[in-house]
Image (cartoon, grey):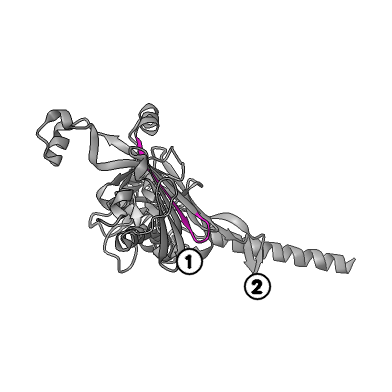
């Protein structure tokens, strides 16, 4: 009987200790302005951050999710690595500069209520730790705060941490500027702009289909280190071709990206472009068998005279309604994600099959 009572007392003491630890971790026992740590807004273990949810006060949201092969936007589109690194760095380094003075808190709260960005940070974390042991380890919401507008000197931001009701001023030591741009709530601004990022030594094959002039289509296949075979549109091998031109073109696949995401077209306009305006397809396969397909579509322009001036044509009948600077593209069949590219950036990839043949 005494042993049972001892077990119950021990369990109760441990439960109280655990409860106190949890309350301190969530900030419930931190009174306003008492023992405030400078890193109260920060999440130091960013390696275990699994999700970041960002939303503005008008209902526009973005969810960034970590997967085995990288970060994704809205759980489906690859995120831009540089922006993700910048976000995680900000999450790690954001520092409390000071608590807003009592006399100004009412005005700051009103401003924050209509002009703030909500940030939720999820992490694979335990419910609590006891003597270094993790208990109930799983994905959890570990930090929620509201990032407000910049201060008057544009060197910091107003912010409110959930569980700590007083508005604060936060910054990153040594960084000259404010933090709001890092917490973009527009999903398209997080999209990875890369279309191709394969080095020439990693290319296994390349297929280019020209729908306007099918005879200008061709295929390239790897035969050895930096050696390739060229085939015409009937997949017949070409015995003699300009090796330098072909290698220059293949080397360009190490860094190809789009200019902007196209979200201003209606469904009808996008469907019309996909149905009638396709002029080229590029299919690249790397040595690991990964296939990247880019379907290209001409962009219409309402200003035919602009095109006339660009190409130097005097005969109005020779003008075309297609934009000669930019075109649309779809990566890997994701037709809902239409992007805009520049012809100039894809200059070598636009060359026809005859370009690679040696001139007699």
Which mark lies nearer to you, 2 or 1?
1
Front position in the image: 253 or 99? 253
The residue under label 2 is: 131
Tell me if residue 163 can be seen: no
The residue under label 1 is: 44
Give the main secondary structure, helix, strand or loop, of the magenta stretch: strand
For this view, does 15 lie left or right of residue 1? left
Q: Position of residue 39 (x, y in %)?
A: 43, 65
Which residues are drawn in magenta? 278-290
Residue at figure coordinates x 34%, y 45% from the top left: 216
Q: Secondary structure at mark 1?
A: loop
Tell me if residue 133 can be seen: yes
Indicate which disc, 2 or 1, sits on the residue closer to the N terminus. Answer: 1
For this view, does 359 lie left or right of residue 70? left
Query: Dot 2, how many residues are within 10 Å of its Cα: few (below 14), some (14-19), or many (20+)?
Result: few
Q: Based on the picture, tell me whether residue 235 belongs to the magenta stretch.
A: no
- Residue at the extreme bottom: 131
Query: Dot 1, how many residues are within 10 Å of its Cα: few (below 14), some (14-19), or many (20+)?
Result: some
For this view, does 318 lie left or right of residue 138? left
| Quadrant of residue 270 within the rendered picture | top left
């Amino acid at each position: 009987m005494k042993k049972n009572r001892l077990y119950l007392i021990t369990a109760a003491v441990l439960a109280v200790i655990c409860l106190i630890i949890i309350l301190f971790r969530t900030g419930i026992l931190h009174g306003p302005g008492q023992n405030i740590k400078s890193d109260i807004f920060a999440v130091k273990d960013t390696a275990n951050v699994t999700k970041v949810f960002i939303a503005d006060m008008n209902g526009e949201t973005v969810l960034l999710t970590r997967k085995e092969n990288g970060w994704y936007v809205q759980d489906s589109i690859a995120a831009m690595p540089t922006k993700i690194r910048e976000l995680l760095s900000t999450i790690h380094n954001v520092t409390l500069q000071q608590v807003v003075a009592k006399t100004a808190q009412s005005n700051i709260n009103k401003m924050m209520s209509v002009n703030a960005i909500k940030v939720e940070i999820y992490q694979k974390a335990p419910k609590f730790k006891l003597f270094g042991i993790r208990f109930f380890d799983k994905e959890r919401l570990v930090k929620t705060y509201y990032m407000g507008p910049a201060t008057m000197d544009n060197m910091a931001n107003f912010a409110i941490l959930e569980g700590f009701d007083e508005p604060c001023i936060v910054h990153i030591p040594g960084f000259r500027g404010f933090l709001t741009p890092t917490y973009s709530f527009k999903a398209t601004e997080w999209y990875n702009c890369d279309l191709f990022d394969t080095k020439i030594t990693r290319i296994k094959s390349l297929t280019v289909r020209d729908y306007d002039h099918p005879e200008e289509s061709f295929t390239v296949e790897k035969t050895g280190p930096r050696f390739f075979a060229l085939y015409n549109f009937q997949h017949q091998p070409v015995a003699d071709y300009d090796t330098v031109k072909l290698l220059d073109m293949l080397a360009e696949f190490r860094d190809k990206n789009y200019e902007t995401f196209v979200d201003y077209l209606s469904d009808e306009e996008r469907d019309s472009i996909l149905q009638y305006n396709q002029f080229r397809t590029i299919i690249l396969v790397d040595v690991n068998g990964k296939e990247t397909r880019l379907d290209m579509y001409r962009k219409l322009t309402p200003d035919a005279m602009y095109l006339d001036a660009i190409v130097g044509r005097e005969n109005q009948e020779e003008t075309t309604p297609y934009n000669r600077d930019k075109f649309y593209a779809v990566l890997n069949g994701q037709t809902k994600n239409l992007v805009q590219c520049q012809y100039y950036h894809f200059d070598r990839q636009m060359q026809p099959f005859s370009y690679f043949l040696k001139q007699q």
